[in-house]
Image: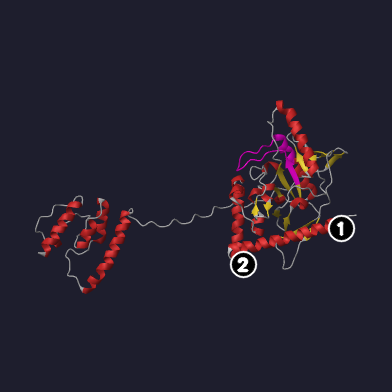
Amino acid sequence: MVNRMKAGKLHGLRQKIPGAKKIPRGTRYANVGLPAEAPSYSKPWVDWLAGRIQDPVTRLRFLQAVAPAPERVRPQTGVVRLLIPGMLALALTGLCLLQAGGHVRTAPKPAARAAIPRPVRSPAAGTVWLVEKTGASEVYSNGLRIDDRFRVSNGARSYLAFPRDPSPGSGGVRRTEVAGVVFHATQSPQAPFEADQNGVLKKIGESLLEYIRRKRAYHFLIDRFGRVYRVVAETDAANHAGYSVWSDERWLYLNLNQSFLGVAIEAWSRPADEAPEMSPAQLRSAGMLIEMLRNRYHIPGENCVTHAQVSVNPANMQIGYHTDWASGFPFGQLGLADNYLRPPAAVWAFGFEANPDYLKWAGHRLAMAVEAAEAELGDQAEQAGRSPRAYRRSLQQEYRERLAAAKRARFREDADSEP
């Protein structure tokens, strides 16, 4: 009687499996011949679960997974009875997986960090010498001509530079020599660079030059026609970089007004790798100017950077307060290595962060440099045995202390220079 009931249930199952032969009534369930790809069936709970699987292929996979290997069903022992609940739970789990697509879905592995190109050194600057100097201009051997008619003074250069790898208790070192160059875009109104706009171009350029002279904003200005004007003498500081941070192989620099020269190009820099608004004449003049400055002041190529790379905001501890030349600056055309690839020192040395708006303006190379700086900060935190967040806070505190020291030194310098 029991066998006939089991055969009847198996008969019902067999009708739901594609390709199954008809089971004659009265056939013992243990001897029923099944298709080669289907297993034998022997448990009521198998029938119950299989009947709730709608998809035929999924149902067949389930039956294959739970079918017993022997052709005959052995009497259940006490151990087997104890195992049935566990087998049922396992089967239910398998059913859920099969209904989800027949395989286990694992969490995706985190993507590997993209390889970040290492910055290279700029080639050595060529030899450049002064050919002629008058009260109104200077001419150099590489073809550079500097208009001196608008030159003004703004206080002698003097600043604190901090060792990049300081010994315990070491402070800043007072220096007066030029350490580098910051390139700026004036972000001023731009008329079309066309012949019929000549009068407008000249008028805009003259107004800009007068404004820069009044503000003592830059050491040099290159106008739309490629003319180079000296505004603030190189011996003095200019008001071009404000709160800013940079580093070379030996020194950390804060507030680059004092330590770096400011070179402004009459242009409007564009965001995220768009072509820069720079005329061919400006490119030629900028190349000659940077060659002369590097030769005269022994400026390393790594210290020729854009305003967007060095500008910071101490109020919120973020980089990129100014974003001019965040992308598109033609380092290579000026005889320089691509300094966009240099990790910003404000991040790895002082714990500053980059907000999304800044990264929208940054080109892909500067964005990779920020990523490299964050990775370096993380490595330093790990070596120090601290969390990145706690380590970042300690770096930010160190920045505040060094900034205060630099301001005190400058205040004493100004007081000593008063008559």
Question: Label 1: few (<14), some or many (≥20) within 10 Å?
Answer: few
Q: Is residue 117 in view?
A: no
- Position of the C terminus, as image quadrant, is bottom right
Q: Name the mark on residue 384.
A: 2
Give the side of residue 374 with respect to residue 167, left or right.
left
In front: label 2 or label 1: 1
**How far across and how far down the image is residue 201, in percent?**
73, 31
Visible residue check, residue 45: yes
Q: Residue at x 17, y 52 (%)?
A: 15
The amino acid at mark 2 is Ala
All told, the count of numbered labels is: 2
The residue closer to the viewer here, 121 or 66, is 66
Residue 184 in the figure: left or right of residue 65: right
Give the labeled residue for mark 1: 416
Taking the magenta stretch, the answer to whether it contains residue 417 is: no
Q: Seen in the image, is 297 located left or right of residue 366?
A: right
Secondary structure, mark 1, is helix
Q: Alpha-carbon neighbours of circle 2 within 10 Å: few (<14), some, or many (≥20)? A: few
- Going from N to C along the chain, the mark reached first, 2 or 1, is 2
Spot occupied by residue 287 in the image (x, y as percentages of width and height): 73, 41
Q: Residue furthest top?
A: 196
Residue 69 position in % (x across, y down): 22, 63
Q: Amino acid at mark 1?
A: Asp
Q: Is 401 rendered above or below residue 368? A: below
In the rendered image, the quadrant that contains the N terminus is: bottom left
Q: Which residues are magenta?
A: 262-287
Q: Quarter-wise, where is residue 324 in the image?
A: top right
What is the secondary structure assignment of the residue under circle 2? loop
Q: Residue at x 64, y 48 (%)?
A: 340
